[in-house]
Image (cartoon, rainbow, N blue to C red):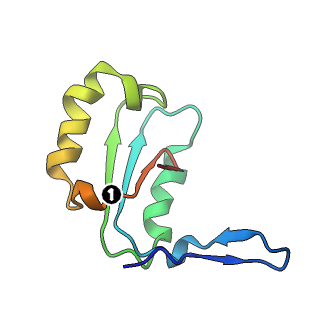
Amino acid sequence: MSIEAHENNADGEVVVNPKNINMPFLNIIAKHDDLVEPDSSKALNDILTDSRDKDLFESKSGHVGLMIGKKVHQKLWPKVQTGSRITHKHWHVSVDSYFI
């Protein structure tokens, strides 16, 4: 696996083509996000066509609650840790479309 998903455009700027990302990808979405449309985040799983290891988890929380909500730490994160097909050492996580 590699992360050679970028190239330089004519101006020398780095351009990332999501279709060329072939690393494992875990997408965690907040269903009640008021900053990032959940359907936009879900679309990443379809766009990353070279990644064979993809998984998606949804939380009933909002944008901020996804990270700091009491219920997500009790319910979502343990589920992600034990229920994802992608092992944590291989995660390239998108939380509401932000790569971290």
Give residue 7's position: percent from left, percent from top.
66, 78
Residue ID for mark 1: 91
Give residue 27's position: percent from left, percent from top.
39, 53
Quarter of the image holding residue 87?
bottom left
User: Residue at point 56% right, 43% down?
Assistant: 37
User: Residue at point 41% right, 25% down?
Assistant: 65
Q: Nearer the viewer, residue 35 or 15?
A: 15
Quarter of the image holding residue 70?
top left
What secondary structure is marked by label 1? loop
Residue extending farthest to the top is 70
Give residue 76's position: percent from left, percent from top.
25, 36
Q: How dense is the environment of label 1, judged by Cα within 10 Å: few (below 14), some, or many (20 and up)?
A: some
Give residue 96's position: percent from left, percent from top.
49, 44
Quarter of the image holding residue 95?
top left
Residue extending farthest to the right is 11
Question: Is 71 on the left or on the right of 94, as rendered?
Answer: left
Compared to residue 34, the image places residue 10 above or below, namely: below
Q: Nearer the viewer, residue 24 or 45?
A: 24
Compared to residue 7, the image places residue 18 above or below, namely: above
Question: Is 81 on the left or on the right of 45, as rendered?
Answer: left
Residue extending farthest to the left is 82
- The amino acid type, in three-letter code, at marker 1 is Trp
User: Residue at point 85% right, 74% down?
Assistant: 11
User: Residue at point 46% right, 71% down?
Assistant: 48
Compared to residue 18, the image places residue 50 above or below, namely: below
Compared to residue 81, the image places residue 47 above or below, namely: below
